Amino acid sequence: MNGSEKHYLERLLDPEDRDMIEKEEHFSQVMMMYSCAIREVQTKLEVLNDDLKSRYQRNPIHSIKSRIKKPVGLAKKLRKKGLAVSVDSIKGNINDVAGVRVICSFVDDIYTISEMLTSQTDITLISQKDYIEHPKPNGYRSLHLIVETPIFLHDQKKLMKVEVQFRTIAMDFWASLEHRIYYKKGKDNQALRQELKDCADISAQLDLRMQAIRSAIENLSLIHI
């Protein structure tokens, strides 16, 4: 935690909430463990992608991104829930401290890779929210998983939670722009919200059409074998 971030956090929190700052060394250790958990999950996904590329000559995963929630964001989330701001509270109440975002080319790749990941013996699926099958009212689409994975330290094994989001390229493009436009300028603009929802629907139709084209090409290849 740098000086400016710590200063901002001190101003943000009530005096009784500064317990988290007092335990900064412990906080850094916990954040390190979340970072290790991200690497564990990301490595598993990269291995799956390499294996499928070797077997079937295509990469279902377009890209992988990751992030750790910042201290200020964690504190604000805990306070919003009416919870104590502490390392133990973070570990016990926030499941998306560590996040991995998997960008796939096609919708069916999302379900294929997510199933392969959660079927591994050292991955435990904690929860799943399918916003592809059931989009949010604003049009947001993504598959959200909370998984638990072990990390091995020098003297112990720890089970750590990681949020894994799966999106197509089109879903990720829409979500990124929606966040920039809506949260900065369009919160109270009903017409803008509807326009963004329409764009999300168009994006979803594009995903389905591109997947249908890919399937048609694969079927033609089989016919010519």
Image: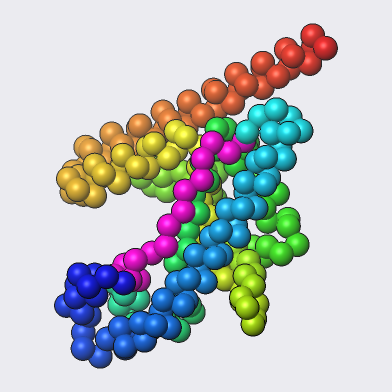
Quadrant in which the C terminus appears: top right
| Range of residues picked out in magenta | 60-74
Give residue 111's position: percent from left, percent from top. Answer: 63, 43
* Residue at 67% in and 47% down: 47
Relative vertical location of residue 44 with respect to residue 167 in this rendering, above or below:
below
* Residue at 43% in and 30% down: 203
Residue 27: image quadrant is: bottom left
- Left or right relative to 153: residue 202: left
Give residue 200's position: percent from left, percent from top. Answer: 39, 35
Q: Nearer the viewer, residue 209 or 172?
A: 172
Q: Residue furthest toward the top?
A: 224
Q: Residue furthest toward the right?
A: 225
Q: Residue furthest toward the front?
A: 154
Q: Nearer the viewer, residue 118 or 87?
A: 87
Residue 73 on the magenta segment: yes
- Would residue 199 be visible to someone looking at this image? yes
